Image: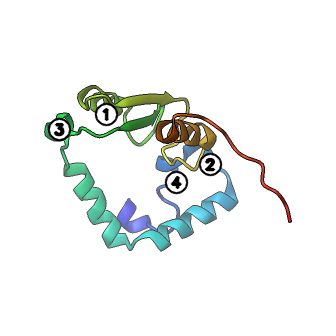
């Protein structure tokens, strides 16, 4: 499906199911696909990703780790993130509501807030900008 339909927005239902009826976004997503990789490259990447097993090395991760997952993600099962969080020492695991996989879709502010707090220790939220 991906190799044949790449560049047409074929992956939108997987990455952003809440926006499949949004025509401007569908056109943007199709362009995003075309600019991101060739059909052959993305097919090879998807095959490679499906064959990777990182389970044996998770316990060797000893750096601050943040794992974010939307509970109803349609592309990656939430259990995969829970599994990683249980095996990475000291990992911070945050489950967010939603089903979109792409972080720029849905409640992106919730994702940014979690990242900001993880990196800085505080949530400042969006700051107003001066217009000059």
Q: Residue 73 location in percent, x, y?
A: 46, 37
- Going from N to C along the chain, the mark reached first, 4 or 2, is 4
In the rendered view, does 105 fall on the left or right side of 129? left
- Going from N to C along the chain, the mark reached first, 3 or 1, is 3
- Secondary element type, mark 4: helix
Residue 80's label in the rendered image is 1
Residue that lies at the very extreme toward the left in this rendered image = 56
For discs 3 and 4, the disc positioned in front in the rendered view = 3
- Going from N to C along the chain, the mark reached first, 2 or 1, is 2
Q: How was the colour assigned to the protein in this rendering?
A: rainbow
For discs 4 and 1, the disc positioned in front in the rendered view = 1
- Going from N to C along the chain, the mark reached first, 3 or 4, is 4
- Secondary element type, mark 1: helix
* Residue assigned mark 2: 19
Say above or below: 21 vs 33. Answer: above
* Residue assigned mark 4: 12
Circles 4 and 2 in contact, beta carbons < 8 Å: yes
In the rendered view, does 4 fall on the left or right side of 128? left
Q: Quadrant of the C terminus?
A: bottom right
CA distance for labels 4 and 2: 8 Å
- Residue at image coords 57%, 34%: 122
Residue that lies at the very extreme toward the top in this rendered image = 86
- Secondary element type, mark 2: helix
Closer to the camera, 63 or 32? 63
* Residue assigned mark 3: 60
Report if residue 97 is visible in the image: yes
Report if residue 71 is visible in the image: no
């Amino acid at each position: 499906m991906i190799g044949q339909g790449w560049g047409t927005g074929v992956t939108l239902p997987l990455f952003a199911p809440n926006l499949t009826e949004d025509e401007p976004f569908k056109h943007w997503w199709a362009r995003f696909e075309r600019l991101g990789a060739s059909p052959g490259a993305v097919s090879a990447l998807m095959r490679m990703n499906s064959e990777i097993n990182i389970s044996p090395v998770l316990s060797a991760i000893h750096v601050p780790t943040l794992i974010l997952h939307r509970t109803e993600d349609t592309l990656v099962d939430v259990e995969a993130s829970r599994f990683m969080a249980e095996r990475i020492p000291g990992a911070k695991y945050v489950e967010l509501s939603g089903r979109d996989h792409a972080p720029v879709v849905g409640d992106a502010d919730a994702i940014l807030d979690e990242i900001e707090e993880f990196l800085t220790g505080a949530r400042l939220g969006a700051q107003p900008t001066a217009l000059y």
